[in-house]
Amino acid sequence: MKAKSVDRIMTGVIVGIGFLIIALLAALLGYLLIRGVGHISWHFLTSAPESIRSGGGIGPQLFNSLFLLVLTMIITVPLGLGAGIYMSEYAKQNRLTAFIRLIVEVLSSFPSIVVGLFGLLVIVNRFGLGLSLMSGALALTVFNLPLMVRITEQALRAVPREQKEAGLALGLSRWRTITTVMLPISLPAIVTGTILAAGRVFGEAAALLFTAGMSSPRLDFSDWNPLHHTSPLNPFRPAETLAVHIWKVNSEGLAPDAAQIAAGASAVLVITVLLFNLGARWLGRALYRKLTAGR
Amino acid sequence: MKKSLLVLTTLALGISLAACGKNENSNNANAGASSGAALSGAISAAGSTALQPLVDQASKKFMDLNKDVTITVNGGGSGAGLSQVAEGTVQIGNSDVFAEEKLKDADADKAKELVDHQVAVVSIAAVANKDVGVDNLTKAQLVDIFTGKVTNWKDVGGKDEKVVLVNRPASSGTRATFENFALGAKSEDLPDSITEDASGTVRKLVSETPGAIGYLALSYLDDTIQALKYEGVEPTSENVASGTYPVWAYEHMYTKGQPEGAVKAFLDYMLSDEIQTTDVKDLGYIPVSDMKVTRDVAGVVSNK
Amino acid sequence: MNMTQTGPADALSKDGGKFPKHRLEELRGRGYVMFCVLLLIVIIFSIVYFIASRGLTPFTSQGVSLGNMLGGLKWAPEADTPSFGALPFLFGSFATSVLAAVIAAPLGICAAIFMTEMMPKVGKNILQPAIELLAGVPSVVYGFVGLSVIVPFLRDVFPGQGVGILAGSIVLSVMILPTITTVATDALRSLPAGLKEGSYALGATRWQTISRLVIPTTLPALMTGVVLGIARAFGEALAVQMVIGNAPHIPHSLTQSAATLTSIITLSMGNTTSGSLHNNALWSLALILLIMTFLFVFVVRLLERRVKRV
């Protein structure tokens, strides 16, 4: 009988902790949203920030965050897919593969500040890219690449062996089999994983302080020529992202409404990450349904 | 066989990566060097976070007047600004301190190449939590507090409350100014003291922590904290300009060599009335032209 | 870079004339994936090379001794006779990240048990998405919440100013909770169902099964999650810097101002000129961080080897 009551108590404790964590998250989200949502308006989301007057917005920062994300993904996804394919399909069981796996692991656990400093030293100064979106994207690639590799590798591993063998039996080359048979099957898992990884990029600040800079030069949203200085699409301009802006406003903000701006921007960030999570699940499911040919 | 190829190419890439940086120390010193009627070019400035809002504000106005000029203003800190301008990565390096104070010893030659443009004066006031019951401190009292000799506010005529120091990191320009001109001595990083670099965070901590004392630029003073008089002199722009309140420093914008073209035009614009009488004052700085005293690198003050 | 890999293939196709198209495609594909892997290797080596080239200068040419940095207690980089004792930061980093793991590990493991053994439905629909969201919240936001909520709370409850190792670890514990929970959940899910069924069939209660069978068998995997969490906490910079106080001393209590390797780097990196001794000393701290990452990965490896043996 004693075992039964211990069981009941411990079940209670664990269920309690489970709900405690849910409550904790709800409290955290609630705190951020309640403080911030009141400040979010169309004007706040679209107008440029002010350094001394109140009423500044986060328009350029929001755009920069999204654009930086796209740039990072353009660089990361092809490279990550490639390395992931190598790891799951071409790598032999030997020392070299073990070594590469170790590298992926080390790379994914590097502190973001170390990567930021590396970016400052090499990408910003040595390569002469300056504090720019491109430098930021390359630094973020360092984080994101190992994640992509792991996601791709796991997704390809999950493809049923019969499918792969069927492809090879039809006389397709290994590469063909991978690109035309296996990748489409693993696509939903890859897409979901990629979007979740993208959420991390969206909130990164420490590495970007040193690489993408803290300034937001005025953008001319009617000029879409990527070569112009004021064009939002120019990847070689310095750009402050939303997370960096929160950091700056909190630490040095002079505008009288700095606290509200920080709260509003935090809420926007959290909502965006939330949308990413929901979007990832939805897209993954939708792709799965579509690719597995009508249920 | 394939393995050795892999290792070889890795090595080759690594070496070329390492080598390629060594010889590109100074490129594009000033991209906007073209002179003539219409100014054009891209100017980048980086450095002091304290000066960033002012330069940012001025750059926006300047870009309105000169459509073909783009100016980007980055933070990063005074040290980063000075290194970058010395290396030629940016055209303007913003700094809270004289370049000679940062670029010392082996780097002293770099400081010689830099040309100083003093665009404003920043004054720093000691601030305390509102509950300490003190509104004036003498130099000796401040030194005692910041070196840990006085640990309770009652020893300097306030309430019976423990002193909590909110200091800046040893590398901070604000701390250097405060040490040089308010304390006249280096302060210690005492155990139990808080160190923050960002003025907003310092203000928040001083206003919330009972018994806290710190120091802030005048632009960050507000009614959540108590600004302290120094030797009976109130920290106001007028007292700084007249030379009675001594805790102040220049805000510098450094260029490598004499500025030309758009960079020169922008620096001139920074010193014009359009910026000096409006934005400089709005941001809590003191226009250089208002100052009745000047100060050199060594800290010697003389009347104008 | 691509050229070295695909070069031979192109050459072959030209002299042979009848080189099969699909072989060429295969070679190109293979070349491309090799290139991607190569890039990973180049990245890691260049990171180590560049950080080390800066971080070792104080020892090689600026007269700072390694022993002083690792064992010294006094950090006074701008003093007339500068000294660079980084022990307080090492202590601060270890103390905050280990304490964060002490707080987060029981919570995370309980959450994993909750999701796999107790209420899989609630777990899958609410707790798991909630924890994924927790992982996506930017560290700046955590720091902001820590400074506005946790620091004032600790200031009221404990003696001291609220800032310190305790505040830092609380913030970090929330940040590493997702890491620990995810790894633990994967470990528990991978346990063969037969094992548990056997235990239940023998009349064991759920808690007996969990405490005597599930946890002991998955322990190395659970520890892996904890170490990964510590590693993440160790490298976190901005959130910690906002709440820890940053006094370069070993604190006497958990609510006394302290500093970590990362917090000192973020505080001073921008204020120092590159090439100066102070600046290079900060790079040395970054190098220590880097070496610690390798150590953590090594520990994780050891633990994983034990997982495989079980």
Image (cartoon, coloured by chain):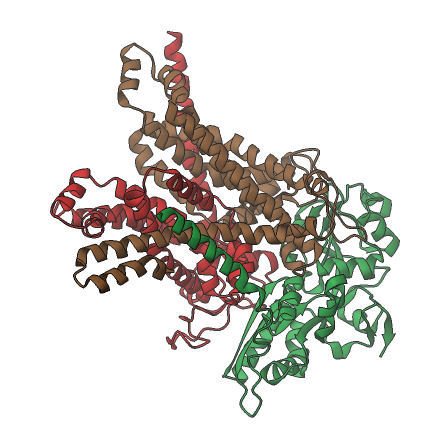
Chain colours: A red, B green, C brown
Q: Residue B170, image x and y in percent?
A: 73, 53
Q: Name the side, left or right, on which C284 lies relative to C229.
A: right
Q: Residue C36, image x and y in percent?
A: 36, 53
Between A230 and B101, which is closer to the camera in this rendering? B101
Q: Name the side, left or right, on which B238 lies relative to A290.
A: right
Between B157 and A115, which is closer to the camera in this rendering? A115
Quadrant location of the C terminus of chain A in the rendered image: top left
x 63%, y 47%: residue: C285
Quadrant location of the N terminus of chain A in the rendered image: top left
Q: Is residue A37 visible?
A: no
Q: Residue furthest top?
A: A1
x 39%, y 16%: residue: C212
**Above or below — where is C114 with respect to A190?**
above
Between C10 and A159, which is closer to the camera in this rendering? C10
**In terms of image quadrants, where is residue B109?**
bottom right
Q: Is residue A123 visible?
A: yes
**Above or below — where is C82 with respect to A62?**
above
x 28%, y 14%: residue: C198
Q: Residue furthest front?
A: C15
**Above or below — where is C297 with respect to B228?**
above
Q: Residue furthest bottom?
A: B37
x 43%, y 24%: residue: C219
Q: Residue B200, image x and y in percent?
A: 63, 56
**Above or below — where is A16 with respect to B104?**
above
**In terms of image quadrants, where is residue B294?**
bottom right
Between C32 and B140, which is closer to the camera in this rendering? C32
